[in-house]
Amino acid sequence: MSNGKMIEARGLTQTFHTGRGKKQTAVHAVAGVDLDVAEGEVVGFLGPNGAGKTTTLRMLVTLLRPTAGTATVAGYDVVRESVQVRRSIGYCSQVGSTFSGAYAGDEVVDHGMLYGMSRTEAVAKGHELFDRLQLDGLWRRMPKNMSGGQKRRLDIAMGLIHSPSLVFLDEPTTGLDPQARANLWEHIRDLRAQQGMTVFLTTHYLDEADALADRILIIDKGTIVASDTADNLKANVSGDLVDLEVAGDEQVAVARDKLASISDSVEVEGHHVRGRVARAGKAVPGLLRDLDAAGVALDSIEVIRPSLDDVFLTLTGRSLRDADETATPPEAEPGQPAYDTTPTA
């Protein structure tokens, strides 16, 4: 692509309407999203339920027509050139796309043929993907007889069969056990490292975004509230959390005063004295010397770097793990049909 962007959206908006007549209410699921994704990036898209993650994704993959705004994906307009978008991308939905009663290999080959591949090409590519995604030996197995991790890797194989330059992964590890999640992480890393793909990943898991994404987009109430690397976002939070556990009641006040000399906000809970300290790695040695000189004995000290949840809390005033959002809006309203992702001639 000439400008190096795989995704470019400006003012992307999706408004649903609930109720009828005078009781009709507009729900702004996505309220003017601007975002850019460069070639070769792995981007993590974060936000709680109802924040607009999936609605934004569905507009980008042409499953939902935007109410307003523009977006190009792989160089094509998502409204005017939706077929070309679908031919250029891979998509792994939250719910998966395999038929539980078909053989896994047949599913992948049929999917490839829908994209214009010959059967011979699709079989060869399918076996290559099964080997790469550790699905070897499962060609003649039905998805209903696979583990959760195997089914998710099969979903990814279907999304990659036509060798797209951009793949969308919507909550790819939801419901997997820790070992299966870690295994799938390695495969996602390989998409960029070995295949040079651009990956757009939506997730609820903070550790997943931290481990996989070059850059993180945070959406809240239908708008993008942050876009940066995980380290930069954390650095913008007001310092590392320093937690001092003192040995006795009489030492709490002294520890509080010493910590307050390097922290703007100190709180006490029992024998624990806590405060946010900018660049704690440099400040803590001096703090320890001051505490020792004042005769304060510590049972423990812990320095905790800000997490992505701290970032979200700072930006929005609530935790990313909060799920008490409004109900997910309907898939599409009359006059704005959802589209399937099968390419057409």
Image (cartoon, rainbow, N blue to C red):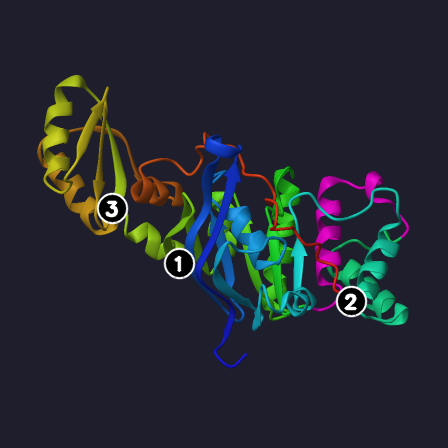
Q: Position of residue 114 (x, y in %)?
A: 81, 63
Tell me if mark 2 has few (under 14), some (14-19) or many (20+) residues whose alpha carbon lies within 10 angstroms of its own. some
Residue 296, image x and y in percent? 15, 29
Q: Amino acid at mark 2?
A: Tyr
Q: Is residue 197 left or right of residue 316?
A: right
Q: Quadrant of residue 178?
A: top right
As shown in the figure, which amino acid type bears the numbered disc 3? Gly
Which residue in the protein does label 2 denote? 115
> Alpha carbon of mark 2 to alpha carbon of mark 1: how far?
35 Å
Crowdedness near tag 1: few (<14), some (14–19) or many (≥20) residues, C-alpha within 10 Å? some
* Disc 1, SS: loop
Q: Kindly identify the residue that appears in the image at 83 percent across and 39 percent down.
A: 144
First in sequence: mark 1 vs mark 3: 1
> Which residue is labeled 1 in the image?
229
User: Measured along the vertical axis of the image, is residue 196 above or below residue 252?
Assistant: below
- Mark closer to the chain start, 2 or 3: 2
Q: Nearer the viewer, residue 304 or 118?
A: 118
According to the image, label 3 marks what residue?
239
Amino acid found under the numbered disc labelled 1: Thr
Up-down: is 301 above or below 272? below
Q: Is residue 157 visible?
A: yes
Please provide the residue range marked out in magenta.
140-163
- Residue at mark 1 to residue at mark 3: CA–CA distance: 17 Å
Which quadrant is the N terminus positioned in? Answer: bottom right
Tell me which secondary structure the magenta stretch mostly adopts.
helix
